[in-house]
Image (tube, rainbow, N blue to C red):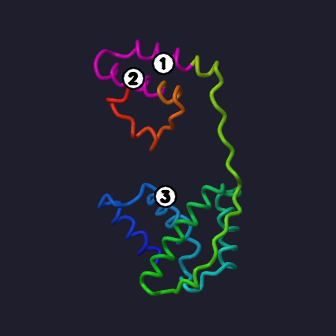
Amino acid sequence: VANLAVKRMEDLLANGQGKVTYKHYIQAINKYLIKYLGNHNIDKIDYALLTKFAIWRAEQLGKTPSQSAINTHNSALNRVFDEALLRGFITKSQVPFLENKGVTSERRDDFTYEEYRTLYRYMRKWVKEAREGNEKAIRSLLRDYVLILANTGLRAGTEAMNLKWQHD
């Protein structure tokens, strides 16, 4: 069933209908869920087995996983259960409760003013040292991007993907 869920997510990604998180779900399914739960029937996966899986996963990672990592694994497992439900392999009442006892992630520190000043001063010099042409243009663009992110609080990734040339 896990392989069927992976196939469905891969097909959705290939058709442009999938979510970015599907890549993370596929990785969690292949690296952890199939490895530990793969020899169990989907209708036999219960709370006790998931508790043993949580202990095994922590041993594999060498630490207690973060809440974010467990959320990803739980979402991936829910995709597998959804696939089993769609195919009639299980009923809704057979889907076990998935809990999250992960470690709360700590927010990274902001740049200090001195670190920020060092960064923007170095990047100015770094752009000037570039060879003329494409290298200088790319470095200049990267410097502008870093400064926009640092000065607006915009986060790199999906938030910054909405940034357009026509934005002032």
Residue type for callout 2: Arg
Residue type for callout 3: His
Callout 3: SS:
helix
Q: Does 150 appear above or below 122?
A: below
- Proximity of marks 2 and 3: CB atoms separated by less than 8 Å: no
- Indicate which disc, 3 or 1, sits on the residue closer to the N terminus: 3
> Which residue is labeled 2 in the image?
139
Between the residue at mark 2 and the residue at mark 3, the CA separation in whole angstroms equals 31 Å
The stretch in magenta equals 119-146
Residue 166 in the image: x percent, y percent? 32, 29
Q: Does 52 appear above or below 115?
A: below
- Proximity of marks 2 and 1: CB atoms separated by less than 8 Å: yes
> Which residue is labeled 1 in the image?
123
Q: What is the crowding at mark 2: few (fewer than 14 residues within 10 Å), some, or many (at least 20)? A: some
Callout 1: SS:
helix
Labelled disc at residue 24 = 3
Residue 45 in the image: x percent, y percent? 60, 81
Q: Residue at x 66, y 57 (%)?
A: 65
Q: Does 95 appear above or below 69?
A: below
Q: Quadrant of the C terminus?
A: top left
